[in-house]
Amino acid sequence: RKTYRICTLPGDGIGPEIMAEGKKVLAAVGKRFGVEFACEDALIGGAAIDATGGPLPDETLDAARASDAVLLASVGGPKWDTTDPAAPRPEQGLLKIRKELGLYTNLRPVQIFSALAGASTLRPEVVDGVDMMIVRELTGGLYFGRRERFYDEPGAGADGKPGQRAYDTLEYREYEVERIARQAFEAARKRRGKVSSVDKANVLETSRMWREIVHRVHDADYPDVELEDVLVDNAAMQLIHRPATFDVVVTENMFGDILSDEAAQITGSLGMLASASLGDGVALYEPSHGSAPDIAGQGIANPLAQILSVEMMLRYSFDMGDAADAVRSAVTSVLDAGLRTRDIADAATPMECVLGTAAMGDAVVERI
Amino acid sequence: RKTYRICTLPGDGIGPEIMAEGKKVLAAVGKRFGVEFACEDALIGGAAIDATGGPLPDETLDAARASDAVLLASVGGPKWDTTDPAAPRPEQGLLKIRKELGLYTNLRPVQIFSALAGASTLRPEVVDGVDMMIVRELTGGLYFGRRERFYDEPGAGADGKPGQRAYDTLEYREYEVERIARQAFEAARKRRGKVSSVDKANVLETSRMWREIVHRVHDADYPDVELEDVLVDNAAMQLIHRPATFDVVVTENMFGDILSDEAAQITGSLGMLASASLGDGVALYEPSHGSAPDIAGQGIANPLAQILSVEMMLRYSFDMGDAADAVRSAVTSVLDAGLRTRDIADAATPMECVLGTAAMGDAVVERI
Ligand SMILES: CC(C)[C@H](C(=O)O)[C@@H](O)C(=O)O
Ligand SMILES: CC(C)[C@H](C(=O)O)[C@@H](O)C(=O)O
């Protein structure tokens, strides 16, 4: 029996609760498909800060590197919110593990489950058929450039008035743009063959370089893929105006952060969206949503994005397409049966169909 | 009779067509309210590049400085699109005039005209009551920081492979954040008393400084205003999820560019939204939409955002609240009468109610 070692990172807020359901699903898949998933928990985020003083202990990084894949739940919460640059923050753990594992490609599929089409705040005819893949560059740009703050620098204020100043740097290198462009074109070939490359080339130098490189890669190696350039402000509009016309959307790290959340919200069911972060080695899978500290510990969080992160892991890291399909149809069937967690329930959902976190996990497992 | 000198900048694409209607409205207002508006055209954008080689000739800047207010239509078009950092670009004219006139506050009201509520791709009950003011910082951040490109730098690629690299700098000084925060709090006091400050404090140093300064200004001078911090990715979601709950939204330049266009699109009628750019001297007014090169010269562009820019000018630069109200009610009455330009018409609009640019301008003028 083949054994896969999975480094599980429950993190903060609802993280531990939804991670438990992810593990249940892995166990069920292992049983049905004759493999073993050996999950080992490690610390990240606020939980790691509380236990060790830092958001990503070396042991966690070592465990992640030694694993076949990393499954993350969520990090962060008001307890660790601070604007003190010297204080540790949970998100640093996430950023550091992305960088250290070289996870430069963030794939965020945005789809509407037909049972949940009514959850969107957009008109049904507008969201009908929405099925896009956001390809976000994940280890460059403003997230990892030099940043600094100068306190009360003489002359930094208006008219020589002293004051603070701060900067962050948006930086890209040619190979970083080239490799993410290739990922986008490859993804498009397996989908509807269209890439929308988002930049702000009318203002940013990094965007002008981005646009040139994306076109060079396209013209040389992917002339069969349709390519359009969209300015980021226009993209923010078009996602609302014509979401169903997007196939693959590729963009740099910060624009990707904003647009992928906007696109996710278009579905109206953020609790259903998973993501994969891929590099040249071990990959990481996590829900697109956050740690929802306001409902943590109540057993009501939606575990489906975590479970769909397991689906992506099976597909991308273990090449177990059949098992991934089984997870996805289990989720679809649960929804079609009318079962909901609170966040995706509506006025028409009968009370007995509104499940807690564990019951929802069980319902998926039953169908695998 | 009081005379106001207005520097008019028709620019590119549909710019000249909609500017003509803006001038018509100014003439009508002048007649009714007993003042004179002396409009003088100057060059900006692609039109200026074609005529002089640069996107903002000194004469234009001088004319703007000597005026009582600047009315801009729109700049840019595919003719001048380039990724060559050395080539002049129309948008540089816009950025330069903002910087040179010190227009650090960009006000973008986002409202739904009840006659056009059906134009949104969002559900009617979600957009009902949408009425927010985006306050965008306009002369700092990534738009004006140092930027550079290095071509084929040895070692800039992966594994020492040569390649290009580029950077842009997101920079803010204390006084820049402080003054835009004050603008937002002042605006909120005249509205529903709530400010949503948008940043990315979990990643950016400039955002952490932004958040500290916004709170310091709030606590010291505007404790009566409600203040919430929203991370930019979350803001992109909440604008779609609960747009009617936002009152004043304040944010830095690039986030403001993205979010104000997203918010504008939520109304479904971008052709209706105007903006004001204010500083310590002369102010500039322009539609929120672009130059729409695809329909330029056809006489079908919607002039209403240009006309509503005139409304903002009357209100903010000339303190002519009554005249501004007259322009707004003329526009509302035109819409209530069922008159539309093509972009805001729908299947139910009778053919004879779909007007061209000039006829729409005339319809507004008739009602002033
Ligand atoms: C938590 C935060 C640092 C992170 C990001 O901005 O990348 C999150 O929003 C995400 O998109 O995964
Ligand atoms: C044309 C462009 C440079 C400009 C900007 O990004 O500021 C425009 O999008 C705007 O919002 O006024």
Image: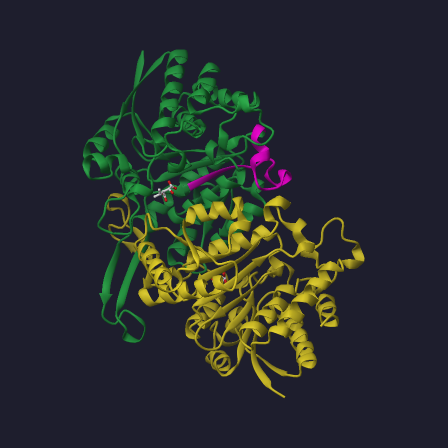
Chain colours: A green, B yellow
- Position of residue A218 relative to residue B280, above or below, is above
Quarter-of-image position of residue A94:
top left
Q: Residue at x 47, y 78 (%)?
A: B61
Image quadrant of ligand 1 equals: top left
Query: Any magenta on residue B17?
Result: no
Is residue B67 in sight in this rendering? yes
Q: Nearer the viewer, residue A341 or A284?
A: A341
Q: Residue at x 41, y 38 (%)?
A: A183
Residue A173: x and y, percent? 32, 50
Question: Is residue B116 left or right of A63 when viewed as pictured?
Answer: right
Query: Any magenta on residue A129?
Result: yes
Question: Is residue A64 left or right of A352 when viewed as pictured?
Answer: left
Q: Residue at x 24, y 50 (%)?
A: B155
- Position of residue A362 relative to residue B216, above or below, is above
Residue B252: x and y, percent? 40, 59
Where does the N terminus of chain A fall, quadrant-wise? top left
Residue B39: x and y, percent? 60, 80
Q: Nearer the viewer, residue B63 or B179?
A: B179
Is residue A225 in sight in this rendering? no
Q: Please report the bounds of the magenta region as a residue range.
A: A115-135
Q: Nearer the viewer, residue B16 or A75?
A: A75
